[in-house]
Image (cartoon, helix red, strand yellow):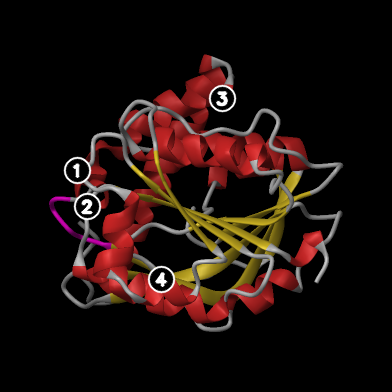
Amino acid sequence: MTNAEEIRIITPILRLDTTFEKTLISLCPQLKTGDLWTICIDSSSQLVPSSLIEFFPLLKQYISEVHIIKSNSAPGAGNTRNYALEEIIARDKASGCLMFLDADDEYHSHFLELARSYFTQDHPVVSFSYNRVHSSGRVHSIVKDAVVPYGKFVFSYGTSCLSTIVFLSRNFSLDGLRFGCRKRANDQLFFLNAAKKAGSVLFVKDIVADYKVGNPKSLSGRMFLMPYYKFLALCDHGLGKPLIFKIMIFYLGSRLISRVTEYVKGRKPWS
């Protein structure tokens, strides 16, 4: 297996939860020799690396592909992911398929093999389709199939941190690609910069993962705050204010249409 086909996955974790075991089960059997799953514990967490091995013995079976560390940067998912990125660079593992999996989400059993097959210099950023799984049990599939140039991407965005791959190579490195430091929308800065660097994003219709939403204690459970943090992420990305306001109007309009569509179909809008 060449470096291009090797998988690098980063998972920030704050606390242990029963859902993390499902995450493990969905991922570990897909790992191959040469892959690297970096589990990075938030600096504000009471967890230590050995506790994960203690509570989840399945990790022992895959420990050669799993690296558990604890961040010493500021708290927050974005900072924790950035710390893990620096660790990957330090370990000379900044190559291959870079992916991000949160501790309560799940990959479908074919995702990693499918990801390996999409390595191409033409599309360094590839975003697959996924399911939004609400805590109430509702499932809404987010499916997109197109090549979206950067100029359109800043309006439509649509990449899920969970199901988007960045293919690292000599021609496409991690230089200039870091997550934001705020609580919400920190992933948008990373993928906006990645899309700008690549020139476009390839969206693929295959559904490869389940993104859990609707937990009132989680960030995804307070999505009404997202427009404000999206605005800040666009500012951090360096866009001019007139363009940002156009993007925000488009974004809010799209969200309204999406909610009305779900209502007409007899579904309640996502909380």
Whether residue 263 is visible, yes or no, is: no
Does 182 appear above or below 64? above
Left or right: residue 45 compared with residue 85: left
Which secondary structure lies at badge 4? helix
Residue shown at the point (71%, 44%) measured from the top left: 92
- Name the foreground residue: 254 vs 148: 148
Q: Which residue is mark 3?
A: 237
Residue 59's label in the rendered image is 4
User: In the image, which residues are magenta?
Assistant: 213-217
Q: What residue is pinned by disc 2?
A: 15
User: CA–CA distance between discs 2 and 4?
Assistant: 16 Å
Q: Position of residue 2 (x, y in %)?
A: 83, 66
Q: Nearer the viewer, mark 3 or mark 2?
A: 2
Q: Earlier in the sequence, mark 3 or mark 2?
A: 2
User: Which residue is rendered at x = 69% and y = 49% of the image?
Assistant: 93
Q: Are marks 1 and 2 in contact (CB under 8 Å)?
A: yes
- In 3D space, how far apart are the residues under numbered discs 3 and 2 (Cα atoms)? 30 Å
Dots 3, 1 in contact, CB < 8 A: no
Name the foreground residue: 5 vs 192.
Answer: 5
From the image, give the main secondary structure of the stretch colored magenta: loop
Observer-nearest of 40 and 143: 40
Amino acid under disc 4 = Leu
The kind of residue tagged 2 is: Arg
Residue 222 painted magenta: no
Q: Position of residue 184 (x, y in %)?
A: 33, 37
Q: Between residues 106 and 207, which one lies in front from this camera angle? A: 106
- Compared with 95, 77 (above or below) is above
The quadrant in which the C terminus is found is: bottom left
